[in-house]
Image (cartoon, rainbow, N blue to C red):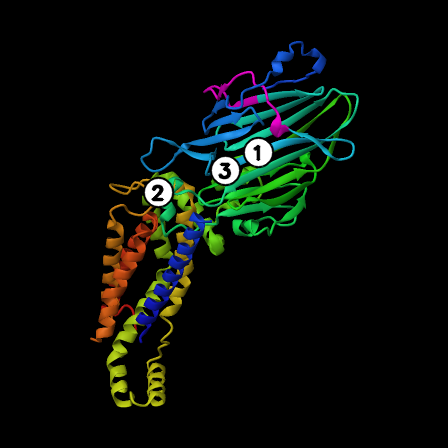
């Protein structure tokens, strides 16, 4: 078997591993305004100000990034939609991120717990009927900041929960202000939670969820003072293998392919405990609990935290919290994928089309790896010239394997050929291919990103499977120009079979990745023609 066959087998083996890992991950995925607020209770003459609110009378908030609904009963976000992202391609609906119904739940909550002097819980803000001055708030065009205060009064203690939205940001600041107007000190904890159904009902699945090309971490993640980034699978939580760590700052999150929800902890919350919890067989949560805080008589205190709810945009996430951008899962080759995406993003900012940006970055990669490709192709040509001699040795010594091996090694030494030299370039180039693969399948910027003609979403498969067919054709021509002079039927069958198998694999790959591979193959063919021309003109010695 010559080096060409070895290269084919290596590529086939690696692609097969990718497909198998993605198939397993996909199955697991499917299964598994107030300014200078100085409130005094005695100054509130109209106690009806804190009237009982109906549970379903949600507060609607519209910003440049969100359309969300806050339930006054508990003061938490009931439903959140991202107005910059559609539910699916060609849909008229916003992408619903946080939601709650009978068979699916995805919620992010924060609560206040009041304790007595003995450390026992007296009550929790999840049972509060918060009051709001309005049931509709909107970030106007001349506004950059929108603040929404919610109020609740209990036993001469005023609780104010303030949601702050900033134009252009997916981070929501949530400030719990507590005014203790009693004659005793009180004890307070702040709790935060992100909980999610693990198994997604079929009606919530889009075509993309069944895509073999999905390859991203789906589970919880957190960051502490000791560890900047830790991933933890839902399965372990369901098995009651929970975690519990203490940290002064950090964050906790639930991460999926393109989006993440995260609580960012601040030093104002003191020392926090991050822990996981199994709610039932289908719901898991990651939570934080602040240390006990004392609010003295006739005084006030604020507890600030930040909720990130949105797409995994590296630059924005890095500004919100250190290492939060690590939730963008680029796999083991993140150190290559991250700079490749930065380069791709830079090109996109100039060109304005992700498809053309992929073509441009493919050209750059192929130019950078041209010396390797040249070495690989020359090695193949050398092996091709040796085929008649190898065939003759096989005829003479094929019955004696030891003598046959000795004669082949001797031939390679005489011709100064390393039969494995053709493998080194492909082995070196595979990490680049895999890095691009992880980058293209996990970058939200390419979600629903159009190219030209029928390609309306570079992150999804070609709806008409034209690109995979073109990719198979380009691979066939590469096989044909690289084949040896041997008329071995086995080699001929491989030459026709491998492009067909690869085309089948690539049917479910993102269009952006198939586009990369097509352009890469075309450049490879041009490079081979150029090298052959230089050899014929004897400008390259073999």
Indicate which disc, 1 or 2, sits on the residue closer to the N terminus.
1
**Screen quadrant of the C terminus:** bottom left
Residue 154 horizontal/vertical position (percent): 68, 21
User: How far separated are the C-alphas under marks 1 and 2?
Assistant: 36 Å
Q: Circle 2 — which element?
A: helix
Q: Are marks 2 and 3 in contact (CB under 8 Å)?
A: no
92 vs 1, nearest the viewer: 92
Indicate which disc, 2 or 3, sits on the residue closer to the N terminus.
3
Q: Which residues are magenta?
A: 125-148
Q: Circle 1 — which element?
A: strand
Instruction: Examine the rendering and report whether any part of residue 168 can be seen.
Output: yes
User: How far separated are the C-alphas under marks 1 and 3?
Assistant: 10 Å
Residue 180 horizontal/vertical position (percent): 73, 22
**Screen quadrant of the N terminus:** bottom left
Residue placed under numbered mark 2 in the picture:
354
User: How far separated are the C-alphas under marks 2 and 3?
Assistant: 31 Å
Left or right: 25 with respect to 506? Answer: right
Quick check: 57 above or below 328?
above
Residue placed under numbered mark 3 in the picture:
106
Disc ID at residue 109: 1
């Amino acid at each position: 078997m010559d080096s060409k066959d070895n290269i084919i087998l290596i590529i086939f083996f690696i692609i097969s591993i990718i497909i198998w890992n993605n198939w397993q991950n996909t199955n697991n995925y499917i299964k598994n305004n107030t300014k200078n607020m100085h409130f005094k209770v005695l100054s509130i003459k109209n106690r009806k100000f804190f009237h009982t609110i109906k549970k379903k009378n949600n507060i609607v908030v519209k910003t440049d990034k969100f359309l969300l609904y806050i339930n006054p009963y508990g003061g938490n976000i009931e439903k959140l939609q991202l107005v910059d992202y559609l539910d699916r391609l060609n849909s008229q609906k916003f992408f619903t991120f946080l939601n709650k119904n009978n068979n699916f739940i995805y919620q992010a909550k924060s609560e206040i717990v009041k304790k007595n002097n003995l450390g026992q819980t007296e009550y929790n803000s999840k049972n509060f009927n918060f009051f709001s001055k309005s049931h509709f708030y909107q970030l106007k065009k001349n506004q950059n900041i929108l603040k929404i205060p919610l109020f609740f009064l209990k036993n001469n203690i005023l609780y104010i929960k303030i949601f702050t939205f900033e134009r252009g940001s997916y981070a929501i600041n949530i400030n719990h202000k507590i005014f203790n107007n009693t004659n005793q000190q009180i004890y307070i904890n702040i709790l935060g939670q992100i909980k999610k159904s693990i198994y997604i009902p079929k009606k919530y699945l889009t075509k993309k969820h069944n895509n073999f090309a999905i390859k991203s971490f789906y589970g919880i993640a957190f960051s502490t003072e000791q560890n900047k980034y830790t991933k933890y699978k839902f399965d372990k939580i369901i098995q009651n293998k929970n975690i519990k760590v203490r940290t002064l700052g950090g964050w906790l999150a639930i991460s999926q392919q393109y989006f993440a929800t995260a609580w960012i902890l601040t030093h104002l919350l003191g020392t926090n405990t991050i822990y996981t919890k199994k709610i039932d067989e289908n719901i898991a949560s990651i939570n934080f609990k602040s240390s006990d805080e004392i609010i003295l008589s006739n005084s006030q205190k604020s507890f600030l935290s930040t909720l990130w709810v949105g797409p995994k945009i590296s630059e924005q996430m890095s500004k919100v919290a250190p290492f939060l951008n690590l939730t963008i899962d680029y796999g083991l080759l993140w150190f290559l994928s991250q700079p490749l995406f930065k380069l791709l993003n830079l090109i996109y900012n100039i060109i304005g089309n992700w498809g053309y940006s992929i073509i441009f970055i493919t050209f750059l990669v192929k130019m950078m790896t041209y010396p390797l490709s040249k070495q690989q192709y020359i090695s193949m040509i050398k092996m091709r010239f040796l085929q008649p001699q190898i065939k003759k040795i096989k005829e003479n010594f094929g019955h004696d394997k030891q003598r046959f091996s000795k004669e082949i090694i001797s031939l390679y030494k005489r011709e100064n050929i390393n039969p494995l030299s053709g493998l080194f370039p492909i082995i070196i180039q595979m990490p680049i291919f895999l890095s691009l693969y992880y980058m293209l399948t996990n970058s939200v910027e390419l979600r629903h990103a159009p190219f030209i003609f029928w390609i309306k979403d570079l992150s999804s498969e070609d709806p008409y499977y034209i690109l995979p067919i073109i990719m198979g054709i380009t691979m066939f021509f590469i096989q044909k120009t690289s084949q040896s002079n041997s008329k071995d039927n086995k080699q001929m069958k491989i030459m026709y079979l491998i492009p067909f198998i690869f085309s089948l694999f690539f049917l479910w790959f993102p269009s952006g990745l198939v586009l990369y591979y097509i352009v890469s193959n075309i450049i490879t063919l041009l490079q081979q023609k150029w090298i052959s021309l230089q050899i014929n003109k004897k400008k390259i010695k073999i």
